[in-house]
């Protein structure tokens, strides 16, 4: 049972580490060749930890045993990891250290309806390859790209300062934004118009 707990802690730490970068967790876990393997593995691990946690709750340890509720501890680590991922905590914490550097770039962003100015600059943990001000509002910093399904379309991921709700200079299909703090958001968008 200690092995299950150790693997759960390592897996949770890996997921939290991937979640620091916008879109990376989804690209790694749900990329086309690995989507079925990762879904099967994550689903199996989730059910295993639920069963082990319930077993530990139903069968209390005897007085002469030390704390051996590894299944319950593993389930608690899993739910804690899911909560941190749900509220984007790793991304919020990591981005807080570099938001001031990106804030300085918002004043110099060129307005663009398609694409952005290539800067290929490292800001904190993030490599910003392009940034642009959208004529509809907001300044967008693209930190990653990935496939959008099986076709030639591309997903763009990054951060946005005061974004609009319509689209980005990198596309407007499947546009998603999530508030981080103050006027900063993370975004994901496809270039499939």
Image (cartoon, grey):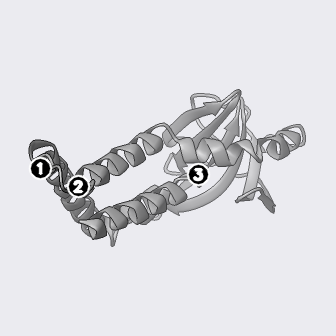
* Marks 2 and 1 in Cβ contact (< 8 Å): yes
Disc nearer the start of the sequence (2/1) = 1
Q: Residue 112: x and y, percent?
A: 76, 43
Looking at the image, the residue that sits furthest to the front is 64
| Position of the N terminus by quadrant | bottom left
User: Helix or strand or loop: what does disc 1 sit on?
Assistant: helix
Q: Quadrant of residue 46?
A: bottom left
Question: What separation in Å lies between label 2 and label 3 (alpha carbons)?
Answer: 36 Å
Q: Which residue is mark 1?
A: 55
Residue position marked by numbered label 2 in the rendering: 71
Residue sitting nearer the eye, 5 or 111: 5
Residue 24 screen position, x and y as percent: 52, 59
Foreground pick, 53 / 36: 53
Front of the two marks 2 and 3: 2
Evaluate whether residue 171 shows in this view. Answer: no
**Residue sitting at x 57%, y 60%:** 145
User: Do labels 2 and 3 touch, CB within 8 Å?
Assistant: no
Q: Residue at x 72, y 42 (%)?
A: 96
Pick whichever of labels 1 and 3 is earlier in the sequence. Answer: 1
| Secondary element at image label 3 | strand
Q: Which residue is mark 3?
A: 157
Q: Is residue 86 left or right of residue 75?
A: right
Spatial CA distance of label 1 from label 3 is 41 Å
Q: Position of residue 8 (x, y in %)?
A: 34, 61
Q: Is residue 71 above or below residue 137?
A: below
Q: Of the residues under marks 2 and 3, which one precedes in the sequence? A: 2
Task: From the viewer's side, name the closer residue of 185 and 115.
Answer: 185
In the displayed structure, 157 sits above or below 172; it is below
């Amino acid at each position: 049972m200690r092995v299950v707990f150790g693997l759960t802690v390592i897996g949770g730490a890996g997921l939290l580490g991937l979640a620091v970068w916008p879109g990376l967790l989804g690209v790694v876990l749900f990329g086309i060749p690995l989507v079925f393997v990762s879904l099967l593995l994550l689903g199996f691990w989730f059910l295993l930890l639920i069963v082990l946690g319930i077993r530990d709750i139903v069968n209390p340890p005897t007085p002469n045993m030390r704390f051996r509720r590894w299944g319950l501890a593993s389930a608690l680590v899993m739910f804690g990891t899911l909560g941190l991922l749900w509220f984007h905590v790793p991304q919020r914490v990591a981005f807080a250290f570099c938001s001031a550097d990106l804030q300085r770039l918002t004043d110099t962003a060129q307005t663009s309806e398609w694409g952005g100015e290539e800067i290929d600059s490292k800001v904190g943990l993030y490599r910003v390859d392009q940034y642009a001000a959208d004529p509809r509002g907001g300044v967008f910093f693209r930190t990653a790209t990935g496939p959008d399904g099986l076709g030639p379309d591309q997903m763009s991921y990054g951060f946005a300062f005061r974004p609009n709700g319509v689209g980005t200079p990198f596309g407007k299909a499947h546009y998603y934004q999530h508030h981080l703090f103050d006027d900063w958001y993370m975004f994901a968008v496809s270039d499939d118009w």
